[in-house]
Each structure stands twice: as C-alpha cells, then as structure tokens.
Amino acid sequence: CADEEGRTLINGTLGVDDDESDPLYNFDILSPTASGVAILVGFVLLVVLFIITVYKIGSLLIGFFCFFLPAILLMKLAIGSIVPSRGFCFQSIVVMFIFIAMSIVGVSQHNLDTGGAEVPKNAAGVEDLFRDDDAGPLVKYKAITNSMVEYPICRMNWGLPGMEPKVSLSALDLGIFAAEIYKNTEKKIVEGVLGGFAGTDLLSGMELEHLADSQEIGRWAVWKIPAAKTRVIAVRGTTTFQDVLVDADLWAFVRILQAFDKFTSMISMMRKSLVRELTGSMSLRAWLHEPSLWQALEDVAAKAKDDSLKDGWATVVTGHSLGGGLAQIIAAHLHIPALVWSPVGIGYSLARFQMTAEAVYETSVLIQPDTDLVPECDLQLGYTQRIPCHSANPFECHNILRSECEIFAMCGDPRGRGGMNKNCGLVMPEWNTTKLEAFKSNTIANARMPTKGGV
C-alpha cells in the first residue's frame, strides 16, 4: 500500500495508489447516520450468509452474490465516508478485518451451540510437581526473613486478613489448585491437591466441595481449607474443543484487531473506550439475549462466596490461561481476590465482560512469563509479576509447571515440600544448571531450602 506519491507504508500510515481513478475511494457521500445504517445492514447480511453456510441452506453461489458482495460494498461505502482521508487500501483492510472477525465469532458460536467435539483423551497431562515418593518427613513452616533479592510476589499471601503466614496461601500454594484442575478425573485431582499439601499446616480438613463436569467450559473446582479459613475456586484453562471455541468467541475479535494494528495502527488511532465499545458489540450471545459463557461459573463462585461470608472465611479464585481470564472476570464481578497464571487479557473487553478497570485493579494479580503469547492477547490490567522464560518454545513458556518452578527458585517454599528440585529438573531443562546454581548461591533462596524432605 502506497500513498499518492508512491511512497511505501511507513509507521502504519496508509495512502491510496490512485485516488482519482478509484471510484470506490470517492464514495465519501454518506452522513454518519447513514454510514452506521449501512454497516448494520452489512452485518445483517453477513449473519444471514453465516446461517446459509453453516446450515447448508441454498447454494453458496446465491449466498455470495446476494449477501456477501452487498455486505462488503455497503461496509466499504460506509467506511469510505467515515475515514476517506485514509485511502482505499486502509478502508479495504478495515472491511476485511470486520469480515474475518465476524466469521470467527459466528462459526465459534455455532459450534458452541451444537456441542463442538468430544473431550480429548488426555486433558493436558499435568504431573504432580510437589510429589516425591522417596521424601522423608516434611519440615515445619519456616518463615523467610532478611530477604534482599526476590520477586515482590514472594511476599504476597491470600486468605483471611490477619491470619498467620503459615496458614495463609502463597502463590506456590494457589498454583497447585490451578495446575491440578487440568486432570481429567476427580480422583486424580483430589490426589494431586492433597498430595501437594501433604504434611503441611493446611492439609487438615481440606476437601473438595464442588467439581464441575469435565466437559464444562473452563471446568472449575471449589476447595474448602479450614486451616486457612478460605475457599479456593480453581478454573481450568483450554483443554477441550469447547474451550477452544470459547477462546475464539470471547477473544477472536480483539486478537484480530491487535493483529491488524501491527500494520494499520488500527488500535493506536482509536480511544480505548471506543475499542471496548466495538469489542462489546461483537457478541452474538448478547444480540440473542443468551446467558454469558461464564454465567454457570459465576453462579457457583457466588454461592462459594456466600458460604464463606456465613462462615467468616475468605474466598480466592485462581486459574491458568483461559481459566485465568475467566477467573479475572469472576473476581471483578464478585469483588474477590484472584491470582492467575499466564491469563488471557481482559483490558479491551471490559464492556463485553460487563466490568470496570477499577474492579480489576483491586482484585487481580497475575504471573506472566516472558515470550508467553497467551497473555499478549487483549490487554492486561491487574498487578503483573513478570518472570523470565529461557525456552525458545513459547508453548513451553505457557506451561504453568515451569512458572511454578520459577517462583520456587526465587521465593523458595517455606512449607518445605519434597520433590521440587527433582521435578523442576524434569520440567525445566536449565534447572540443573543456571536455576539450581542460582538457587544454591543466593543466600535468600538458600535460607528457604529445608534440611529435610528430599529437596
């Protein structure tokens, strides 16, 4: 795309190749109201085209000439009237963006309504990071003092205010719930969580109060922890094909918008409030007045919060990836704290998720590894603890077990749970070189290393 003088695209500024000879470019004749109507009619035509395509009603040829071409021309006419100075190339890209975004949202919505695909055979294959069959008795909780070099999140605890640190929940503690929810059976989930707290001050009376079906979108579990006087809600990340469709339904529009922003400065030229309004309008469920995809989870979380208030307890929500995004929505709606791992963002989607930025500021803490692509989707608003990831594979950087090992290397584990060094060596190839040496040579980290328990 070049401007009138043939100059190359620079810094996202687009001109036209030949605006005098391009009849489409000279369609800047509609008023703002007429432009809005034209875009709305174009959307309606595209929706009809989706119905024809998905349900195989009539021929694709009729759909193309009767619906697709009129829709594109109407939106081109409207956008040419709104942003005529940007040129034919920019306007065409905007139209293409709208069509792609609507296509993904429409197809994902259809698949969600018709059930999608079956659950995969292996739900993420998460192993027990804290388990060590050869470990001896665990050491008692040992508070960390005189720290000089550590992540700020090492000093954070979740749970009922005023409780002693040994019966409060650390990031490492909450990471157990967020990782174990990926397992595909209730037995494995319970064994994984209870095994992660074996021999600690928190194990007594810990029980699973509620577990959603494995095919639920963002499967969740509610844990009761009497020692901490806290309930923990853990939300699963993307595992089933249904979860993949939810990712597309909720975040496809804004992700495509971000992709187009790389070479059109589409987001940069708009106010955040406008981006949020556009994202909020791209919801077929809202148009059809259907319940939100997170409503079932929010209902369970609201009940857990009510139960905790009656007991005088706290409620905390955690999750990873898609589960982290859903957890932030629930936390903002119910005003409960959340610690989330590698979550998809929610900053551009506030209107769609019916929440405010202030509610996210007040509730969400997130852990984001470098080069992890998932948190780059949308915009992060919560307090963010960045951590390094030295893997060349961005999918490895998205692994919650790797993130837990990084937190362990810098924060240690005052509960002295066994097996972390051995298991982190399996999760992180560099653990037995740079991480372990740094762990041993760091006096702060060394103070956290228990003398027993196989670590």
Image (cartoon, helix red, strand yellow):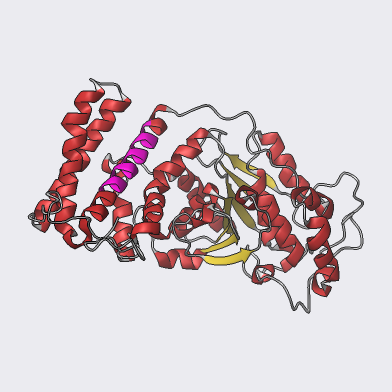
Question: Is residue 129 highlighted in magenta?
Answer: no
Residue 9's x, y, as percent? 33, 61
**Towards the viewer: 122 or 271:** 271
**Towards the viewer: 60 or 155:** 60
**Towards the viewer: 24 or 94:** 24
Residue 149's x, y, as percent? 73, 75
Q: Is residue 244 above or below residue 139?
A: above
Residue 255 lies left or right of residue 220; in this view the side is: left
- Residue pictured at 16% horizontal, 54% vertical: 80
Magenta residues, as a range?
95-110
On the rendered image, what quadrant is the N terminus found in? bottom left
Q: How many marks?
A: 0
Q: Residue 139, located in which quarter of the rendered image?
A: bottom right
Residue 47's x, y, as percent? 25, 36
- Residue pictured at 57% horizontal, 61% vertical: 366
Residue 312 lies left or right of residue 448; in this view the side is: left
Residue 411 lies left or right of residue 6; in this view the side is: right
Tell me, yes or no, if residue 239 can be seen here: yes
Question: Is residue 109 highlighted in magenta?
Answer: yes
Residue 388's x, y, as percent? 66, 63
Q: Main secondary structure of the magenta part?
A: helix
Tell me, yes or no, if residue 415 can be seen here: no
Q: Is residue 285 above or below residue 205?
A: above
Q: Residue 113, located in which quarter of the rendered image?
A: top left
On the rendered image, what quadrant is the C terminus found in? bottom right
